[in-house]
Each structure stands twice: as structure tokens, then as C-alpha cells.
Amino acid sequence: MRKRLSPYLPVLACFCLFSGCAVGPDFQTPAGPAAPGYAPTPLPAQTSSASGLAGDAQRFGVGQAIPLEWWALFHSPEIDRLVRDALAHSPTLAAAQANLRVARETYSAQYSSLLLPNANAQLQGARERVSGITYGLSGGGVDGTAFIASLNATYNVDLFGAARRAVEGYSAQIDVANYELQAAYLTLTSAVVQSAIAQASLRAQLQATNEVLAAEQHELDLVERQFKLGAINQAILLSQKTQVETTRAQIPALEKAIAQNRDQLAMLTGRLPSDADLPIVTIASISLPQEVPVSLPSELVRQRPDILTSEAQLHVASAQVGVATAALYPTLGITAQYGRESLGFRELSNPGNTIWSIGAGLTQPLFFNGQLTAQKRAAIAAYDQAQAQYQSTVLQAFQSVADALRAIEGDATSLEAIAGVDALAKKSLDLAQTQYRLGAVSTLVLLDAERQYAQAHLNLVGAQASRFSDTATLFQALGGGWWQRGTALPEVALPAVAGAQVSQSNQ
């Protein structure tokens, strides 16, 4: 005996039909690496120290939060001003902000288009000739005018989640644009700080070179007097002149590098190179941060904008797999129309001329020569590619942090050694100069002492700058603290460009 079907079964079937399901994978945030640290051995409590500028020991604060304005840890008003100018006027940052607005508006447009019903009003008039047979007349045609005023609505029922997966992808694109904006912010601030430190280093090198040149010139004056008195031969005089000119030849290259560095800072801060209002950064105006916060490895994947961007791109690829999968299943479209139709415009108000229609269409893909399955396989391959790129980005991020930490440790040890070499070279030069004036050593001994001190002093300046630079590199490698910002970045104020204004209106 056949069982009687429940009267509620059709209702339940309709509910299931219209509610639909989203096929394809549900995106899961990748788990971060379970790494205990950034190196096989734990970080030391602090670095070694040295006397003089940038010689303080730095202590590693494992697990401490990185401040939003991390560059303020260098206590340099000039660096702080340069960074703030860059954040206020950089066109690169403005472009990233505009890209985020594009992503948000695209999401809004696609959400409305794909998930919500669409309706439009239509008023149509046409003059036409039809065959008399249409109206039961024989021979000839009939001229007429038809007017239609109607409201038309369409709605695509998202049976298998194609639209929802597409909208999910557009939402993930907002995340991509947002993290790209944070990456632009981090890159910009880091570039300004690094350029400012490079400027300070170049100026210190120039100052050191000028000091060495002044000392060598003083010795040359002494040698020239001795040569005129016949106390030394010409070869010694030429050697001293060669040493002076060799040192002097280094100055134009340093001056060129300083000028180019200034041009770079002007560009980074949204200025033209001709703008003169740029602060001068000196090595003595920068303080070495003694407390260096170091994020836990488990936190790094949530702090690095490049990792988060790669994760959002993986989300986009996951959503595209769902879209490609849903394309294999049926689609349901509903249309509705309500309006009036008449042969005269004034008769449109007559209720007797009312027209309406409602309909639904179900479409099932049958034969596309393997196109749809190939598209799904391509989407899966794109997801695999995005997943591999995410893993590569994570590995590169951990490497950059490990390299920066190693550099900070190595910088401190190198500076300690180089400072000792510089002090010894200075003592050796002072002794050689005194003995030379007393006639106890030859000019060759003096020249050798001058060369050693010049090189040792320039090495000291470079080692001091490296401690500042590699500390800034570590802050950048750890993400730069952008997540500490409670509100969005202020919009960059770019100068108006003639003819570039576009009017906006709400639709």
C-alpha cells in the first residue's frame, strides 16, 4: 500500500529550494607556524655595548607590543617631522587609500547586483504597422501607436551560492586593499626613517672626511716647509700630496649622495626636489632605542601586512572555487512586470489597460564541452597557487625578522670592536704626528697612520649608522605597529590638479 505524502512536503521543498546552499569550500584562516622563536637558540637578554655614540646596549622585550609611532623611539624631532609630512602628503599612500575606496564601492555594487532584486520603470512608445490578418482583416496593413508604462523586476535566486561566493570574494578584496594600504603605510614610514638615517650617516662621513682632510692638509703644509728647506726629498712631498688629494676626492661623491638622499626624502614626503623646507638629520640627533620590543612568532602572522594581504588573496581564491562549482548547478531567475498598455498616451491611466506578468525560469547547464569543469579545476589550481604564495610569504617574513635580530646582535659586537680600533688608530696617529715633528719617524710612517685612522673613523661612522638602520629594519619586519591605530588613516591631502576634478552624484 502506498503511503500518503505529507501536505507539508511541497512547502518544505520550496523552502529548501529558495534558501539554497553555498557550494565550494568555506574559507578557514590558516594557522600560524608553531615556532618557539626566530632562531634555534633563544635571544640574549641584551646586546653588547660600546663607548660613544650608538654604543648603548639594547634589551630585547620578547612579547612586548610595538608602538604605532615606532619611529618616535629614536627621539629625533627631524625624523618625526619627516614621517608626519610623508603621511600627510605622500601620493603613494593616497593611491592606496583610493584603491581601498574602489574595493568598498565595488563590493556594494556587486552585493546589490547579485543578491538583491532589481527593478526599473519603463515608458515606451512605438509607431508600427502590422498585418491586417493580426486583427482578423483581409489585405493591407494597420497603422497604430502603442504605449507601455510598466515596472519590471528581476531576481536571481542564489540556489547554490554562486552569488554569495562571488560577494564573499569581493568582501575579501576589501581586506586585500586594506592590508595593502597598511603595507604602503609601513613601507612609507620605514623608507623615510631609513633615508633619514642614511642622510645622517652620509653627513657624518662627510664631516669625518673633512676632519681627516684638514689634518692631512696641515701635515702637507709642514712637509712643504721641510721640502723647501731641503730636509726631505720630493718623493715624500708627492706622497703626502697624493694622500691629501685622495681624501679630497671622496668629498664630491659624499656630497652627491647627500643631495640625492635629500631628493629622495622630498619625494617620500610629497615634495618637489626644489622645496627647501626639509629638516637636516644628523647622527648626533638620533638616539638608539635601548628597549626593543619583539613580537612573539605566533603574533607575527596577524601583524605583517604582507602576510595578511596574502591571506586575503587566498580567501578570494577560495571564493572563486565556490563560484566555479556553483556554475555546474541549475540557476533560477524570477521576473515580474506590472503596468499599462494602450494605443493612446492618455489611455494609460485606464485601469482596463492593466497588464502584468510573473514568471520563473530554471536553467541547468548540460553540455559545454568541458568548459565548466575546466573552470573549476583552474579555480582550484589558483587556490593552490595562492596557498603556496601565502606559505612563501610567511617564510620570508620569519626570515626577515631573524635576519634583523641577527643584524642587531652583530651590529653591537661590531661597533664594540670598531670603536676600539678607532680609538687605537687615533692614538697611533697622534703619536706618529708628535714623533714626526720631532724627527723620530719617517713621513711614510705618518702617512700610514693617517690612512689607518681615516679608514677606522669612517668604519666607526658606518657601524653607528648600522645600529640605527637595523633597529628600524626590525620594527618594519615585525609589522610596524599599524594595528595599534584605533581609527582609519587620515586621508592624504594632495594638491589639486587642474582638470582632474570629477563630480560625484548619488545614484
Image (spheres, rainbow, N blue to C red):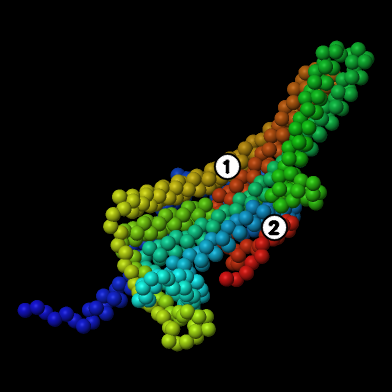
Q: Is residue 437 left or right of residue 379?
A: right
Question: Residue flagged by tag 1: what amino acid is it?
Answer: Ala
**Residue 455 shows in this picture:** yes
Query: As drawn, which residue projects farthest toward the bottom?
Result: 351
Q: Helix or strand or loop: what does disc 2 sit on?
A: loop
**Residue 160 shows in this picture:** no
Please identify the quarter of the rendering in which residue 133 is found. Answer: bottom left
Counting residues from the start of the chain, the first of labels 1 and 2 encountered is 1
Residue located at (38% from left, 71% from top): 139
Question: Residue flagged by tag 2: what amino acid is it?
Answer: Ala
Q: Position of residue 141 (x, y in %)?
A: 42, 71
Residue located at (52% from left, 63% from top): 106
User: In the image, is residue 6 above or below residue 79?
Assistant: below
User: In the image, is residue 453 above or below residue 296?
Assistant: above
User: In the image, is residue 130 above or below residue 42?
Assistant: below
Q: Position of residue 501 (x, y in %)?
A: 69, 60
- The residue wearing badge 2 is 500
Residue located at (81% from left, 24% from top): 245
Q: Helix or strand or loop: what does disc 1 sit on?
A: helix
Q: Work out whether residue 406 or residue 262 is closer to the camera in this orientation and state it.
A: 262
- The residue wearing badge 1 is 407
Q: Is residue 336 left or right of residue 488?
A: left
Q: Position of residue 103 (x, y in %)?
A: 54, 61
Q: Work out whether residue 152 or residue 192 is closer to the camera in this orientation and state it.
A: 152
Q: Work out whether residue 291 or residue 492 is closer to the camera in this orientation and state it.
A: 492
Q: Is residue 168 left or right of residue 12?
A: right
Q: Position of residue 70 (x, y in %)?
A: 63, 56
